Image (cartoon, grey):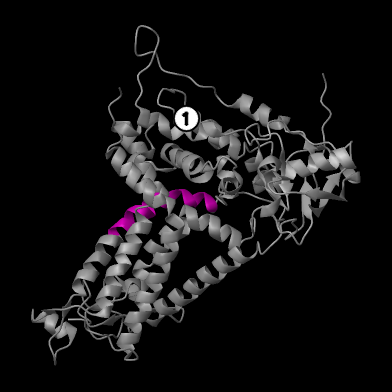
Amino acid sequence: MTRTPIQLPQQRQFGETSRLGAWWLQPLLVFLGLGAFIVYSTWAAFQGAYYASGPYLSPMYSPLIWEGAGQATSGHNWLGHWPDWLPAAVVGLPITPAFLILWAPGGFRFTCYYYRGAYYKAFWADPISCAVGEPRKSYWGERKFPLILQNIHRYFFYVAALFIVILTYDALVAMWFPPEGMTYAQAHEAHALEFGFGIGTLVLIVNPVLLGLYTFGCHSFRHIIGGHKDCVTKAPAGKKAYECVSCLNKRHMLYAWMSLFWVGFTDFYVRMCAMGYWTDLRIF
Amino acid sequence: MAQREFRIQRGSGDDAHLETYTTDVGEGMVVLDAVHQIQAESAPDLACRWNCKAGKCGSCSAEVNGMPKLMCMTRLEDLPEDQPVTIEPIRAFPLMRDLVTDVSWNFRVKEKIKPFAPRKPDNEDGSWNMQQDDVERVQEFRKCIECFLCQDVCHVLRDHHLHDEFYGPRFYVYSAALEMHPLDTENRLEQLKDDGNIGYCNITKCCTKVCPEHITITDNAIIPLKERIVDEYYDPITKLFKMFKPKK
C-alpha cells in the first residue's frame, strides 16, 4: 500500500488565532511584571548605596561581601571595605557589591523551568500564547547553544539554597537594634545590640520564607530529592520528602511571583528607610 | 430553545473554508451534539470523527473557538453566547476533510519508542513485587486517551512542523510511563534526547493546559525526563558520582 503525503495546514502569521478573549493579557502581564523587576533590580544594583538601614540589609546586596566603594561601614559586611584590587567601575559603569552576588539568584530564576516558559512567551513570543501564530519560522528550542545552558539549572539551585540560609541569617540579624545614640555599625562593633522587632524585621522574615517556598519547590530539587528514582520509596530522602517538594512544586509559579515581588519590595523598604523617606515602626 | 450560530471548517486543501450554520441549542448540549444536529438538519456530508461521547475515546478532538478541545466535553453554555462558535480541525496534522485529520503520524512515532522491558520476575510463578507508591506516579500517565490535543497545541509541531525530529508531548508522557516504571530496565534517554529531541520543548505548558484528562504533562513527565537527561549528559558531578558508585 502506498501512502499519499498530505500537506500540513499553512503556518499562521504572528498573532493569528481563532481564540476569543484576551489571550494576550497573560503574556503582557508577565512582560510588565518581569520587565519592571529587571529594570528596578538593575537600577538598585547600580546604586551601590542605601542598601542597609540599621539592622536591615537589602536582599539584593546580601551577602554583603565588601562594603560598597566609598560607603561608610554598615556593620553588615563580611570582609570589610571594598578592596583596592577590585575596580569600582568598568567602562564608566559602577561595580557595586550587588553585582558580586546577583548572578546567583538571577541565574536561578533565569534557568527556572517556570520562568523559561513564561519569558519565552512574554519576551520572545515563542509562542506568545497557546494556539497563537508565531513571529518566526525557524526554531532551535533548548537543544543548541545558548539555550542548551539552561540545563545547568540544578547548579544554580545549589547556590540559591545557600542564599536561603544567608537571608534567614539576615532576618535574624534584623531583630537586633542599636541603642539610642549609636549607629548599627558602632553597636555591632561594641556588642551592644538590643533585641527588638520592627516592621522591617517582618519584611525581612517574610523574604526567606517566600524564597524558600519557591526555591525548595524547584523542579531540579524535586528530581534530586527522589524524582530520579523509578522506585520513589527507595529515594535517599524518602517518599515523604519527595511528596513535600512535589507539593511546593505544584504552586511553583505562585511562589515564583510572590518571592520576586517581595525581594523587590524588601529592597525598596530598606532603601526608603536608609534614605530617610520612611521611618521604620518598632513593634517592640 | 435558543438558536446559536456555528462557523465550521469545511472542505480540504486550498478549498478549506468556514461555513456558517444556525441550529437550536438546549441546556446541557455539548459542541458535538450541535455538530450532529447540524449534520442531521443541513450538512449530512459534514465529516467529523467521534465515538464514545464521554471524553474517553479521544476521537472528537477539534479546535473550538481556537483552543484544542474534545467536542464531546465542551458545553455550549461555557462558550461566549454573544459570538458564533468556531469549530476547526486540529492544526498539527494533515487535514483530510472538514473536521477530520490524519493522525497516523502519531502511531508511527509510538512504534519507534523502545518498548517496556521488565526485569526478571521476582517470584517463581512469574510475578513481580512492587510498592503501590512506586507505581502511582506512572498511573497518572496511563490516563492518556490519545486525543492528541497536546500534540496539536504544541508549537513545535503546530507552528514549526518539526514532525520528523520531535515526538511531541503525548510521546514524552508515554516514554515517561515506561521510563519511570519500577519494573522497566530499558534506557530511553539517548533516544529521547537525540531522536525525540525533547530539547525542542521550551516548557510553554500549553500541552498541560489542554489535556482533557488533566495529566500534568510538563511538570510530571517532560521536566522529569529533561532532568534525567541532564543527569546522563550535562551534569559532570552526577557523572562522576555514577563512576564511583558501586555496581549492583
Q: Is residue B152 left or right of residue A254?
A: right
| Residue position for label 1 | B179
Task: Look at the picture and state if A179 lies above or below A243.
Answer: below
Task: Look at the picture and state if B200 lies above or below B194.
Answer: below
> The disc numbered 1 marks a residue on which chain?
B
- Magenta stretch bounds: A147-162
Q: Is residue A244 left or right of residue A138?
A: left
Residue A274 in magenta stretch: no
Q: Tally the numbered discs.
A: 1
Q: Position of residue A41 (x, y in %)?
A: 43, 74
Task: Look at the picture and state if A182 lies above or below A96.
Answer: below
Q: Position of residue A67 (x, y in %)?
A: 27, 78
Q: Position of residue A137 (x, y in %)?
A: 72, 52
Q: In the structure shown, which secondary structural element does the residue marked by tag 1 occupy? A: helix
Rate crowding at label 1 as few (under 14), some (14 to 19) or many (20 or more) other CA atoms within 10 Å: many
Q: Residue at x 60, y 36 (%)?
A: B170
Looking at the image, which is closer to me, A205 or B9?
Answer: B9
Name the kind of residue labelled 1 in the image: Glu
Does the image show residue B28?
yes
Q: Residue at x 27, y 79 (%)?
A: A199
Provide the major secondary structure of the magenta segment: helix
Looking at the image, which is closer to me, B222 or A101?
Answer: B222
Residue A148 in magenta stretch: yes
